[in-house]
Structures are given as structure tokens and as C-alpha cells.
Image (tube, grey):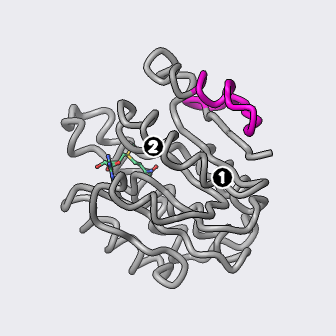
Amino acid sequence: MFHNIPQAIQKQMESLEEIDTRDRQDGTPLVKRLRQVTPETGRLLAFLAAGAAKGAWLEIGTSAGYSALWLSLAARQRSAKLITFELLPDKIKLAKDTFKKAAVEDVVELIHGDARGHVRDYAEVGFCFLDAEREMHLDFFQLISPNLVPGGLLVMDGAVKYAEMLQPVIDAASDDPGLDSVVITADRGLLVCRKA
Ligand SMILES: C[S@@+](CC[C@H](N)C(=O)[O-])C[C@H]1O[C@@H](n2cnc3c(N)ncnc32)[C@H](O)[C@@H]1O
């Protein structure tokens, strides 16, 4: 999966990494920034998704498509399709461009709109990456976690960096007797929940 990343994907990843780094240094307002995961977290997401149980693959919060590019590597390997949701028209435009140039449109489906209106449609979820606005994460957790299949994974970014704000989600995951959960302290921290 990581040994032969297609050049078209590699090129888009590098270009988004440059933009994201620049955004974080030059005072670009938050709403305009890509706010994407780090390369290390991207690899970890692909690694986790590649081993998830069978079921729908969801991503809540596409931005320009960087994390989806990592997940596309696992989707290709598993013959799965990632369904990724984005709210903002500017980000949708960037993500469409990313997926076209990276030639991943066959394994990534981009849905424009508030994911809260869509996630109930997926009754059997094998993998979900939750990376929207942090105030919404408890709502998303409560909507999605009951629909995880046995062995299904729900992963949330920011579990260490934004621990105070995300504590209600971390607590809800550890209090759920149907889930095993861990916080991985790499980068901004990832909460990983697995349906027993
Ligand atoms: C942190 S960024 C996602 C970064 C992306 N996952 C990556 O690593 O490349 C969060 C994105 O979620 C989008 N978003 C926020 N709330 C949403 C919602 N309810 N439904 C769909 N997208 C949402 C925002 O517009 C923003 O682009």
C-alpha cells in the first residue's frame, strides 16, 4: 500500500502538504485553511482502514481531500469505496480537483452537504474517520457508533490536542460497553473505537 503510491497521488499529497504548511504560518483565516491531518496521521488512517471489517467507509470532513487520498490507498487495496462529506463549496471545489488529478474518483465519492443529514443512511459502517468541527463530534459519534459492524472502526482526530473539548466523546466511547477504545498519542492524538 505504501510501497507503490501512484505518482499522481503523491504529487497531490505534496502539493496539499505545502499549502497546509503555508496556511498555518501566514495567518490564513481558519475557514480558508485546509486544516488537514499530518502525513504521519494519514498513514495511520490508511493502515487502520486497511484492516477494518467489511461495511461502508465514511469520512466526515473532506477539506481539500488530503486524508481521503491516504484512505484511497487502503480503499483500492480492499476494493472498498470511501464516501467523504464536505459542507463548504470552496472546499468541495478543491477536493474535486484533488480527486480528479490524483485519479481516485473510482474509489472516493464526494458528497456535498452537512453530513449530519446523511450518516443515518449508512446502517453498516466498517470504517469512519470523523474530522469535522469539534463541537459536532459528540453528535456524529452518537449517530455513527451504533451503526458500526462488529470489528468496525471509528477514528477521530484531535483527541490529545483538543482533549478538553473532545472529552465528552472520549468518555462516551469508553463508557460504551459495545466498544473498545484507545487514544493514540501520535500527532494531535487519535481516538480509535472498535465495535466488539
Ligand atoms: C479539519 S477539516 C478536514 C480535513 C481533512 N479530513 C484532511 O485531513 O484532509 C474539517 C472539514 O470539515 C468540514 N465540515 C465541518 N462540518 C461539517 C459537516 N457537518 N458536514 C460536512 N463537512 C463538514 C469543514 O468545512 C472542513 O472543511
Front tag of 1 and 2: 2
Q: Residue at x 74, y 59 (%)?
A: 52
Q: Residue at x 48, y 68 (%)?
A: 83
- Secondary element type, mark 2: helix
Query: As displayed, is residue 91 above or below residue 109?
Result: above
**What range is drawn magenta here?**
170-189
89 or 10: which is nearer to us? 89
Residue 107: % across, % down: 55, 78
Looking at mark 1, is its residue's CB closer than 8 Å to ligand 1? no
Which quarter shows the C terminus? top right
- From the viewer's perspective, is 168 left or right of 52? left
- Secondary element type, mark 1: helix
Which quarter shows the N terminus? bottom right
Residue 78: % across, % down: 73, 74
Residue type at tag 1: Arg
- From the viewer's perspective, is 139 left or right of 81? left
Q: Per the image, is 80 magenta?
A: no
- From the viewer's perspective, is 145 left or right of 142? right
Q: Quadrant of residue 136?
A: top left
- From the viewer's perspective, is 119 left or right of 156? left
| Spatial CA span between label 1 and label 2 | 23 Å
> Nearer the N terminus, badge 1 or badge 2?
1
Residue 192: % across, % down: 67, 39
Residue type at tag 2: Phe
Looking at mark 2, is its residue's CB closer than 8 Å to ligand 1? yes
Q: Residue at x 31, y 32 (%)?
A: 25
Which numbered marker is on residue 140?
A: 2
Which numbered marker is on residue 43?
A: 1
